[in-house]
Image (cartoon, grey):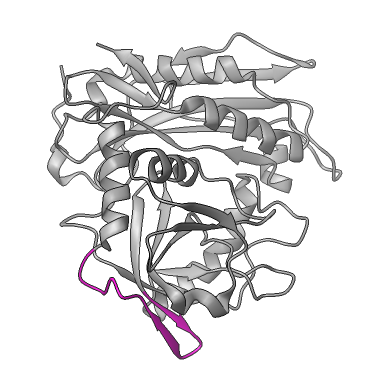
Amino acid sequence: MSKDIDWSNLGFGYVPTDKRFVANFTNGAWDEGALIDDPMVTMSECAGVLQYAQTCFEGLKAYRTEDGKVVCFRPDLNAARMADSCRRLEMPVFPEDKFVQACLDVVKANLDFVPPYGSGATLYLRPYMFGINPVIGVKPANDYQFRIFCTPVGPYFKGGAKPIVIRVSDFDRAAPNGTGHIKAGLNYAMSLHAIVDAHNKGYSENMYLDPKTRTKVEETGGANFIFITKDGTLVTPKSDSILPSITRRSLCIVAEKYLGMKVEHREVFLDELENFAECGLCGTAAVISPVGKIDDHGKEICFSSGMEEMGPWTKKLYDTLTGIQMGRIEAPEGWIRVIAE
């Protein structure tokens, strides 16, 4: 039975649910973990995460499909990406099979919070890990906690996805050979000043350039870029300091296998942006946010798709991927994990 929630007016924020998963790493090994009721985290004032930001996280969604199933979208890729993040931050890897199972268990334990099909809302899952024992010298923690909570969230765009205006940022999101390719909390902390500054100046997002030459497009603070050429080719920027977005990788397969588009994953230079017909930001929250205009220090780069609605190819990509997620279109093998019939 669904909870008494006004699904159609749900925002993109935190709503406490009944259960969350917690596992602890102590004495060099993970315990079995368990579903618990308590949403509060208790730790030392000197915990490693509080002193040296040793934490990483993931984000994925569960959906109620057209035929009434509750499903999860490609959780194995989130498990693999979190494992990469942990290795880079000198944290113990939570076993990938147990990560996926814990995600499914959290959804199953909170089925009443999965929004109904057609509401535009979904159940957002947040797996995360952090160093929990006291650390005063600069070194990795010894003990860690892995947790997953879930929260129902409304559609990222209310009333349709209107194209946004973004700016080319003077700030760098990541250092060369740094941590831009992993989902570390510290990357997002570094981006907060830049996004607040962008919002204060009337922009929806920042376009970060490569930190070494500042000539190539990287990503925004929380999403990968996609571009569509005038002849309908999907182009995605390639860089060692871009987070490998699961949505972006899925869209590339959708473009090629479902829509018959040519796909290029390559370096994208700032000075070629005016040659593209469409632009979008892709990620778990919105799937695709269309971009209508980019401000490069007073020079306006406008896409022919305009400021009124998604471009035609972007719309096809969006409709196809969300159709797969919601069960309206048959998914590639292994993409959809059924949690409840």
Give the percent coordinates (x, y) of residue 308. Answer: 20, 71
The boundaries of the magenta stretch are: 293-309
Task: Report the number of discs.
Answer: 0
Q: Is residue 273 left or right of residue 145?
A: left
Q: Is residue 94 left or right of residue 19?
A: right
* Residue at screen point 57% across, 68% down: 208
Give the percent coordinates (x, y) of residue 29. Answer: 74, 14
Asked if 306 appears above or below 228 in the picture, the reply is below
Asked if 20 appears above or below 270 in the picture, the reply is above
Residue at the extreme top of the image, as rendered: 32
Which quadrant of the rendered structure holds the N terminus?
A: top left
Q: Camera-side residue: 157 or 311? A: 311
Q: Is residue 44 visible?
A: no
Is 315 a magenta residue? no
Q: Is residue 291 visible?
A: yes
Is 304 a magenta residue? yes
Give the percent coordinates (x, y) of residue 255. Answer: 39, 46
Q: Camera-side residue: 120 or 313? A: 313
Q: Quadrant of residue 56?
A: top right
Give the percent coordinates (x, y) of residue 290. Answer: 33, 62
* Residue at screen point 24% across, 65% down: 162
Q: Quadrant of residue 269?
A: bottom right
Q: Is residue 154 left or right of residue 244?
A: left
Asked if 295 appears above or below 331 in the picture, the reply is below
Asked if 190 appears above or below 259 in the picture, the reply is below
